[in-house]
Amino acid sequence: MFWSVRPLWIALLLAIGFACAGDAHAQAGTIGNIGHTIPVCVRRVQPGDTPQAMFAQAGRFDCTTPQLSLGAGDFWILSAPLPRPADADAPIRVRQVSMWQRQMTLYAQAADGRIVGQFADEFGIGQRLRLGAVVEHRFVPAGAPFTRLLWRIDGASNMRGIVLGPRLATDAQSIRSDTLLAALYSAFAGLALGLLVYNFALWRVLRHDFQLAYCGLLACLLLYALSSSGAMAWLLPDMSNNRRILFSYVMLCGGMAAALTFCACFFEARVLDGWPLRAMRIVILAFCGLAVVLMAIGAPLMPILDRIFSVMMLASPVVVLLAMVRAGRRRSAYLSLFALSWVAPLAMLVMRALYNLGALPWNFWIDNSTIVAMTAETLLASVAIAYRMRMLSHERDEAIRQEAISRELADTDPLTGLLNRRAFLARAVPSDGPRTLMLFDIDHFKQVNDTIGHDGGDEVLRLFARTLRYHALPGVLVARMGGEEFALLGEESMLPDVDVILASVRAVRLPFDLRITSSIGICHGPLGDENDWKRLYRMADKALFQAKAAGRDRAGRALAA
């Protein structure tokens, strides 16, 4: 069914991709690139430095060296002259990306030479966060517009930069950015929470490992979105900004481990056996170990751990691609949909890893690509899971059908289609109340075989079985006990008339104008356990022997003691 609508799937995905790309481009000016970009220059802090001296010595700042190449430490960051505002009395908002640093002081110099500053340590930075993890300072002019900005950054780890993405915005632009980002994060949170509840409920019923891994991925992504969006700083105002960033790292490690576990469990059994599964498990354990190290001693070793994390992010798509190659070679039925659902996350991982390692410049959408890519992944992965569940349902139904066929074959005599002796006894004992057993034996069956051959003898057995089945009412057990011996078992009132059966057997026409007859032994008695069965069978067999001794083509009766 999936392949029959594959063109529609591709068209739908392309339409979504173009729509998302167009929407991202349209919103970039209002979310990621809000306000006016501020070019900056950098200088290391020296003993005796003052804000007044730094504003006066703009020529001593380095405006060409990339910030990343300067390493960790304490820095002055000086902006280029600010553009003349349309309203000299309007407040300004200075926005920048939240970074790992011990403390920050932002100074604003007015046209009249007045300098005002705002200090924030790790906790103060967290209290200044806006949605998108953007640090924002607000300055109100006092008669003269602001002309320049100066940052003093202490304890900068410089893992991505010192002051990253500084921009100048108005109150209206800041509020619009928060509103749009609130819609983005809320949509993602609602989607992820709904999928989490739905898939966890399914897991409680079906117990598939990939469902639990997917729930773990969604839970980590929800917590990561709460942290990376900056909303966690609003909910936990006493949490430092560096601790919030550390929490984001831990959630990403957990999310990566859960995503790789999902990949390992999603395909059919034994598809990834061997080195692909071993490689995936190694990376999963590495992410789990890194999460433990980050929680235990993360802060002092953050630059090193960040580099390890970035390399592992770059290695994860390689492991997933190798697993997909193995799944393709072994013709997995789930490969196509899995590949579609993982396109966005794999591309995001590569971009984020290259950005973290300094190979790509900072961009708002790269910095926030996790949420965008994971939104696409959760949607497509939910489709993949639905398709996987559909296939599992088909596999289960087919397994049940095959099991029923196997059970029927195991319980059925292959020649006549009647119950065999084992199945007959399993259904007969115990019985509620007394039962009547009728044992049949075809008279002179050896002569039949000698006359028309064994193939003809098999046809006689089939015709005899058909006759018994025709006369047996529903609820009466009909079985071939072995050779030319057959049995009927049921309540006495439901068993066929003996004379009718004997007449029907005589009426069967065979090659060479042969006719067959049957002798019957009948016994009535309790059938509560194995001993009752042995007694009932023994007495019926004795009655059958008496019928043969009396001339065959007749019935003998006995009563179980």
Image (spheres, helix red, strand yellow):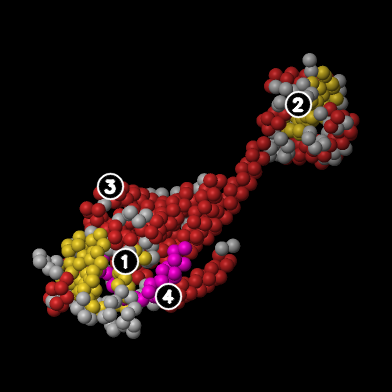
Q: Is residue 278 above or below residue 49?
A: above
Alpha-carbon span between mark 2 and mark 1: 81 Å
Q: Which mark is residue 432?
A: 2
Residue at mark 4 to residue at mark 2: CA–CA distance: 77 Å
Q: Which residues are magenta?
A: 158-186
Q: Is residue 176 magenta?
A: yes
Badge nearest the viewer, 3 or 1: 1
> In this orientation, which residue lies closer to the viewer: 450 or 479?
479
Nearer to me, 498 or 229: 229
Q: Amino acid at mark 4?
A: Gln
Q: Secondary structure at mark 1?
A: strand
Which numbered tag is attached to residue 296? 3
Of callouts 3 and 1, which one flags the residue occurring earlier in the amino acid sequence?
1
| Amino acid type, mark 1 | Val
Crowd rating for badge 4 (residues with CA inside 10 Å; few <14, some 14–19, many 20+):
some
Does residue 548 appear in the picture of this structure?
A: no
Residue bearing mark 4: 27
